[in-house]
Amino acid sequence: MLSRQSTRSFSVSMSGTSQGRASAAVAQSKEKSTGKKEKLDLKPPKGTRDFYPEDMRMRNWLFGHWKDVARLHGFEEYDAPVLESEELYIRKAGEEVTQQLYNFEDKGERRVSLRPEMTPSLARMVMARGKSLTLPVKWFSIPQCWRYERMTRGRRREHYQWNMDIWGVPGIEAEAELLSAIVTFFKRVGITSQDVGIKVNSRAVLSEVLTAMGVPADKFAATCVLVDKLEKVKLDDIRGEMQELGLTDEIITKLVATLSIKDLDALEQTLGNGSKALAQLKQLMEYAEAYGFRDWLIFDASVVRGLAYYTGVVFEGFDRKGELRAICGGGRYDELLATFGGEPLPAVGFGFGDAVIAELLKDRNLLPNFDNNKEDKKMKWAFKHAERLGASHLVIIGEDEIAKGIVQVKNLAKGEQVEVEVSKVSDFIAEQLASS
Amino acid sequence: MLSRQSTRSFSVSMSGTSQGRASAAVAQSKEKSTGKKEKLDLKPPKGTRDFYPEDMRMRNWLFGHWKDVARLHGFEEYDAPVLESEELYIRKAGEEVTQQLYNFEDKGERRVSLRPEMTPSLARMVMARGKSLTLPVKWFSIPQCWRYERMTRGRRREHYQWNMDIWGVPGIEAEAELLSAIVTFFKRVGITSQDVGIKVNSRAVLSEVLTAMGVPADKFAATCVLVDKLEKVKLDDIRGEMQELGLTDEIITKLVATLSIKDLDALEQTLGNGSKALAQLKQLMEYAEAYGFRDWLIFDASVVRGLAYYTGVVFEGFDRKGELRAICGGGRYDELLATFGGEPLPAVGFGFGDAVIAELLKDRNLLPNFDNNKEDKKMKWAFKHAERLGASHLVIIGEDEIAKGIVQVKNLAKGEQVEVEVSKVSDFIAEQLASS
């Protein structure tokens, strides 16, 4: 039950690729027209990152896998402004995401916010297109998302987050397809089901329990947000807030007992075999079996996720060693458009941040070398420089070559060097790149 | 002498690909806990764009060409936060770019700004790395840049801007390489030197004239910013500001006469044949001849660009019909690090916005079709849907196919359809994609 922020992984600094910034911390002075010297801070703003070329190679590698997996699953890319109207994020359920908005008033006195998550922008875009959209909509994006904490324990204020969403599919096959994409990504980068699992639950489980005990539906979202906090805080710390929502001690006891359920047989004993939540979860496990990723899934009734708008299946990826925060998370949010005043439209999606996965890949030694900084003292400067750049080929033009009208082309990956006519160098390298 | 903003092309809305937003303008209501209904605006914030999949295909196509050209020229990609400390942009020369900052105070009472341009972030990053950087640095980026105008005549507040910069090369060959990249891009997308020219000048021309007339060096940047405004306003509208800078009527007359020079022979008569500015411009034209893009260049002494920090060669791309604002622009800025309190380091770069080029490509009918919205009434829904998605292949699984353990794979681009064993579909399509 990690909160969305910790799940969506703003906090931990990645893989040391920006360590050049250590030297950057030396403040420099600049002269202003007053004649006074002021310090220019060479670091990026607090909680943000620069991407030097070696960092960018890592980012492009990761994003490349995300994009490839999304496209292999037939998803189309979209984007929205990083700055949105604040009202898009105003929800009353007490979520961390809405409490930590990076919001401000612009010069036109409009309340705006750097986006904390992509889903509300996506919902706005889907709603704007309305009936003209061909369903199902299967869209992905890799937005940069922002938050502002006053107490910033060295935590990041921005991260990039892979989002995939399906609109217009009420059935559980949409969840199965998203989980398939997540697993496909993990496999591509060398992560196995021994490294990572995906906890699965449905908010319908809690909904059925609470409804049976007479809790009104309009208390459900806020209850889920509170339950999500149990990962970090003790029950007694939030018991008061639960009581304010009208949950009696009897209900709270039943709730906590339900959260502890870890297998579907036990769930059936609690909900009865007519439970729709149970049927959906069983169906999802069957689809996972058919897809071939059943071994990645674990039913866990304590997973509810921290966003108010989830209504059905929820899930989160976690490392089985238990050392990291959640790797990714998502769920079904069939009512989000209704909260914006539109017609409800079935929807399910996930967010997958760039920080925790980078830690995990580094820890498992699964990251390629993006530095290209090896030092071979026998190589000349040109070779070293080509390596530092991560160049694929080095073209060598000496006096002999000029006399003959040829150049030497060294394929740096293969170590092969061949003579090529000057007029054919471009085509030759293009061919090699196409076939590599 | 277009200003940077108009040059870097924030203003005109592109190619109608976001017209879905027309229907988006229908405001919807949402219920708040007070019971009152409020309108949720379905449009993105004023002056910003959503990217629906068809818009994103256009963006990816354009960015793909930019990235390919940059990499072909050996440039490495970098990035920096879209939010920077405001002080990075505080310059006193009266530039439009610093007058239109999208700036605000964050919750920690820091003055910050959405970046109006990338160069100051790049300079900060270069300065932070200091001596550990291997020179020359050849880096590119495609940042989203922001501005805020109070009087917004329907102009955009954000655009994407291709940036390429070279650091550590004092010689004019750096300018030649950047111009080569720009021309390479134009050629790749089908634009010729009949469509587009690149005006070239050097601020050293004005500097030599002003220095000879006794104008102090510290008035130079502000003078250039004023001169740049002559594209939009009459001389008499800024004569007062020029006089405030200490420029006498005699100097202003000489300045204006210099700006009217359109060929290097006339320039030689003004500056004398010992002029360094003249020698550099001649050298640049020789390099352009050797590269094979001399026909794209036009010397024009009136081009100074609107950014305060340029010191040497400046250039801007323009459509020869004269219908559009400048397409791209750049120049040498050898003193920027010094203004930040660092050691000077030779640098040259350009910015190339996504709006004017889109207009030009549309006008010349050079844009691929990104809509995939043709309606062939005889095709089944699956075919239409695949087309709408811009899919490359359609896999058809019917009862006959299931019985035989095969599927039909239709290559939608080529119109070819073949039978493939189920277990080989993935490899088959991957091969076709690799060879297309």
Image (spheres, coloured by chain):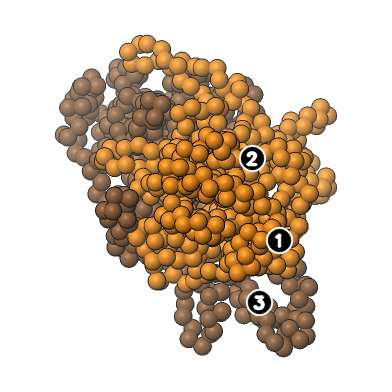
Chain colours: A brown, B orange
Q: Residues within 10 Å of mark 1 (few under 14, many from 20)?
A: few
Q: Residues within 10 Å of mark 3 (few under 14, many from 20)?
A: some
> The disc labelled 3 sits on which kind of residue?
Val
**Horizontally, is A402 left or right of A41 in the view?**
right
Task: Work out how far the residue at label 3 is from the one at label 2, CA to CA, in angstroms.
Answer: 39 Å
Circle on res. A395: 3
Q: Do marks 1 and 2 both belong to one polypeptide chain?
A: yes
Determine which residue is flagged by label 2: B325
Q: Do marks 3 and 2 both belong to one polypeptide chain?
A: no
Q: Position of residue A210 (x, y in %)?
A: 31, 23
Instruction: Work out whether B102 lies above or below B289.
Output: above
Please tell me which residue is depicted at 77% across the width and 72% down the height of the picture: A424
Q: Position of residue B319 (x, y in %)?
A: 71, 44
Instruction: Work out whether A34 lies above or below A251.
Output: below
Determine which residue is flagged by label 1: B265
Q: Can residue A164 be seen in this snapshot?
A: no
Q: Position of residue A314 (x, y in %)?
A: 42, 36
Query: Between tags 3 and 2, which lies in front?
Result: 2
Q: Which chain hosts label 1?
A: B
Q: Do marks 3 and 1 both belong to one polypeptide chain?
A: no
Q: Nearer the viewer, residue A149 or A139?
A: A149
Instruction: Work out whether B103 lies above or below B42.
Output: below
> The disc labelled 1 sits on which kind of residue?
Asp
**Horizontally, is A238 left or right of B189 in the view?**
left
Q: Earlier in the sequence, mark 1 or mark 2?
A: 1
